[in-house]
């Protein structure tokens, strides 16, 4: 018997990537903070919802497109902003940006990427001239040095990014035990490409590079008034990334911001918070359709995407699945990831009796009933 195994789902991609990457990278990409409880629960929580399909509905055509801020996307599966993707594969962030563009998916780039904003735009330009549309958003960390953040915003605007995701859950870095135990180093041949050579070099000498970088540079005093000020500095819509409660969701609306990403940073910040899918409903209720609500964390299958849409998310970001896909096979790996998630979502919709995403609502899911004992 041949040992050949075809990749069939995102777990297969993850398993293959775990065999390829070295410890330094795996320690950084994989675990959540502290005891990994929230990171695990992000995935498990999806299994606590059941699907409630309807039948005999004519599902011969299924349309997965969604519209946000005037852009239409072919799929609600978006690429999350995650740092330092060249550690997964030399093509790094550009591989995921190109794949998202070919798939008509949303793309987001981290402030602390190993490919610059400008190089991301260059990497998708040939695809755009073939008629593909790239919709790219920039994830902004607000630096103590405000000029540094303002410069990033200007560069994002000039490089064709059309929204900002301001990360609100990281005034300090969460305690990531594997990185504390073994140390973490950005490999010498890589650098934080949005900055002059040398950015983070002082931290680089520290065995806990990232936590030192954040405490040196990122402003832990950030508050709502700063986001109101940021709004005056750009025409781009601003989404707040890292909201988990109805209270904060209301403040996002009251402060005139444009969107929400329900996120716990992939369980990498405050361990012990709820799974994002369990926080989604209260955020969606609080926002009352005034601004779009998106979600990330633990999405591994098309049926997870379906459940998030049923609870009111407009789109879903995937973080680690992109990193594993890059590790597996660069841009082609991310193409495979989109093929799988899109096919799974299409099938979940068809088998649930819906032919477009606007039909998906809470009636198609229910909390898992306690299984009766045999
Ligand atoms: C290795 C890694 C690096 C990340 N870097 C950033 C970052 O630079 N900025 C940010 O806002 N979120 C960052 N995130 C969080 C992601 O944007 C996203 O919230 C999370 O990965 C979603 O969970 P998932 O990995 O389970 O899909 C990072 C996540 C990972 C796994
Ligand atoms: O690791 C992360 O999750 C992250 O957000 C980050 C922030 C600053 C530098 C590097 C990574």
Image: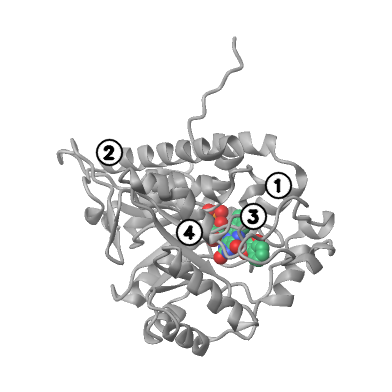
Q: Which mark is residue 312?
A: none
Of discs 3 and 1, which sits in the foreground?
3
Which is more N-terminal, label 1 or label 3? 1
Residue 38: image x %, image y %? 60, 60
Closer to the eye: label 4 or 2: 4
Tag 3 near tag 1, CB within 8 Å? no
Towards the viewer: 273 or 293 = 293
Q: Residues within 10 Å of mark 2 (few under 14, many from 20)?
A: some
224 relative to 361 in the view: left or right: right
- Mark 4 vs 1: CB contact within 8 A: no
Q: Which residue is disc 2 drawn over? A: 351
Q: Position of residue 188 (x, y in %)?
A: 78, 52
Q: Quadrant of residue 113?
A: bottom right
Residue 115, image x and y in percent?
A: 59, 55
Specify the quadrant that holds the N terminus: top right
Q: Nearer the viewer, mark 4 or mark 1?
A: 4
Of mark 3 and mark 4, the one earlier in the sequence is 3
């Amino acid at each position: 018997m041949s040992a050949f195994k075809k990749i069939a789902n995102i777990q297969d991609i993850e398993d293959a990537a775990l065999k390829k990457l070295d410890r330094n990278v795996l320690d950084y990409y994989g675990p959540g903070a502290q005891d990994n409880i929230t990171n695990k629960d992000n995935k498990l929580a999806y299994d606590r919802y059941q699907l409630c399909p309807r039948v005999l509905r004519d599902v011969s055509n299924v349309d997965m497109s969604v519209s946000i801020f005037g852009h239409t996307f072919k799929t609600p599966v978006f690429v999350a902003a995650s740092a330092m993707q060249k550690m997964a594969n030399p093509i790094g962030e550009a591989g995921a940006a190109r794949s998202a563009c070919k798939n008509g998916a949303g793309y987001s780039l981290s402030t602390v990427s190993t490919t610059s904003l400008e190089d991301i735009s260059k990497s998708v330009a040939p695809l755009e001239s073939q008629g593909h549309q790239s919709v790219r958003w920039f994830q902004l960390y607000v630096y103590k040095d405000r000029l540094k953040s303002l410069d990033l915003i200007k560069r994002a605007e000039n490089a064709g990014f059309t929204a900002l995701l301001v990360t609100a859950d990281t005034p300090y870095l969460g305690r990531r035990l594997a990185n504390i135990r073994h140390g973490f180093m950005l490999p010498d041949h890589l650098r934080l490409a949005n900055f002059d050579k040398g950015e983070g070099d002082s931290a680089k000498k520290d065995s806990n590079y990232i936590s030192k970088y954040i405490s040196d540079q990122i402003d832990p005093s950030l508050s709502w008034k700063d986001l109101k000020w940021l709004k005056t500095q750009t025409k781009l819509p601003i989404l707040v990334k890292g909201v988990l409660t109805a209270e904060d969701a209301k403040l996002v609306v009251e402060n005139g911001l444009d969107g929400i990403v329900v996120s716990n940073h992939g369980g990498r910040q405050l361990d012990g918070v709820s799974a994002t899918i369990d926080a989604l409903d209260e955020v969606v209720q609080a926002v009352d359709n005034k601004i779009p609500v998106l979600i990330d964390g633990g999405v591994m299958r098309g049926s997870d995407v379906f459940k998030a849409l049923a609870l009111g998310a407009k789109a879903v970001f995937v973080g680690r699945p992109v990193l594993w896909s890059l590790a597996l096979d660069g841009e082609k790996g991310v193409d495979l990831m989109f093929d799988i998630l899109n096919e799974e979502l299409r099938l979940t919709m068809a088998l649930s009796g819906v032919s477009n995403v606007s039909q998906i609502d809470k009636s198609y899911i229910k909390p898992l009933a306690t299984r009766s004992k045999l």
